[in-house]
Amino acid sequence: MKEKILIIGLSPVLAGTETFIMTYYRNLDPDKFQIDFIVRTQEKVIFEDEIRARGSQIFYIPPKRKNPIVYKKAMHSFFSKHASEYHIIWYHVMGVSNIDMLIYAKKYGIEKRIIHSHVSQWRGSWMRYILHQLNKKKLFHYATDYFACSQLAAQYLYNGSVLDKSIIINNAVDIDKFLFSVDQRKRIREELGWSNNKVIGNIGRLAVQKNQPFLLDVFNVALKQDSSLRLVILGDNSLSEGTLSVIKQKIQDYHIHDKVKLVGSQSNIQAWLSAFDLFILPSLFEGLPLSAVEAQANGLPVLVSDTVTEELKILDSTAYLPLDADLQVWAQQIITMLTMKRSQQETIDKRFAEKGFDIKKQVKDVENILLGEQIE
């Protein structure tokens, strides 16, 4: 008999958590698990068509902030009707200002209640932060299992005995989907008009956390040392918090319109990674950035800020720098790393397997955890 899992964490926007959820969803054994989703939005979530095509259901709950009474009725109606169908609820979070899903899951008898931390720092209003802090202390009442993408993400959300019980679930990827492609590299670079340039890439939402304005500061300094440099920024800007306007202003101020491309959200990540010569992520904070894992799966040298957990370093060609280091230090590191060659596939396969970032291996451990069995 299949274990039925109810997952919370998808949104209308493609980001790291959504990518993580879908990677495991696609790789968990369908003979062992039936997976459905519940979301607190009325907008169509990312990957909905694929999810329904795979035979899973998506249950929509109206947002609490719009009408708390309607929300409460919808939650009660859903859990009273469907909770008995599920053995596991898997709740993916950036914060816990709202833990109603866990409260209702316990009230209506869902036995295994997992909370999964995906970031290392709070980002939101002070009012919601107070609720977040209060709810952190209640987690042991309502959750039974505590997951995190890294030690930093675990320390951010869990304390005391809860932290001791937490389990790190790596942001593993399907390596085959990110293999370096000579043909894709050539195609993208020709389309950009940058076939003979050194192309730096950044992938991430245009949000304060991802710190792209700092990247532009660094790039502008590096460009003065090597005029052949070019920069591509991929990322959804629908929730840019004003970051997009800051980015555009810096591009204008530095007069680098012809050297920087903002290409928005893209689905063919393998092709873009193949086109890059270096991947940079100067985030203010992260849980464990999937984009940088994917970049390493493509064999790219990767430069990240030292706010990112050390667990990200899968390949030796990944380096860290502090955000308070001089821009010249960052620029020189870029120039140096652009001389590095891509990692060979044999090395990538070996390191990803050893460090638990190959989804084919990691998913087996997660299946055992979900089934309450010993990890091999």
Image (cartoon, grey):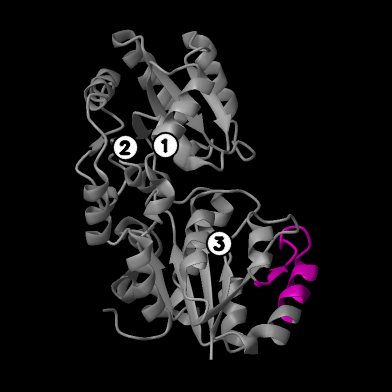
Q: Earlier in the sequence, mark 1 or mark 2?
A: 1
> Can residue 81 be seen in this snapshot?
yes
Crowd tier of the residue under label 3, counting other residues whose Cα lies within 10 Å: few below 14, some 14–19, many 20 or above: some
**Secondary structure category for the residue under label 3:** loop
**Secondary structure category for the residue under label 2:** loop
Q: Residue at x 57, y 62 (%)?
A: 9
Cα distance between the residues tagged 1 and 2: 8 Å
Q: Which residue is mark 1?
A: 273
Q: Residue at x 49, y 28 (%)?
A: 188
Q: Amino acid at mark 2?
A: Leu
Q: Amino acid at mark 3?
A: Ser
How far across and how far down the image is residue 246, in percent?
55, 24
Horizontal side of 198 relative to 177 (left or right) equals left
Q: Which residue is mark 3?
A: 97
Front-lying residue, 178 or 336: 178
How far across and how far down the image is residue 328, in percent?
26, 17
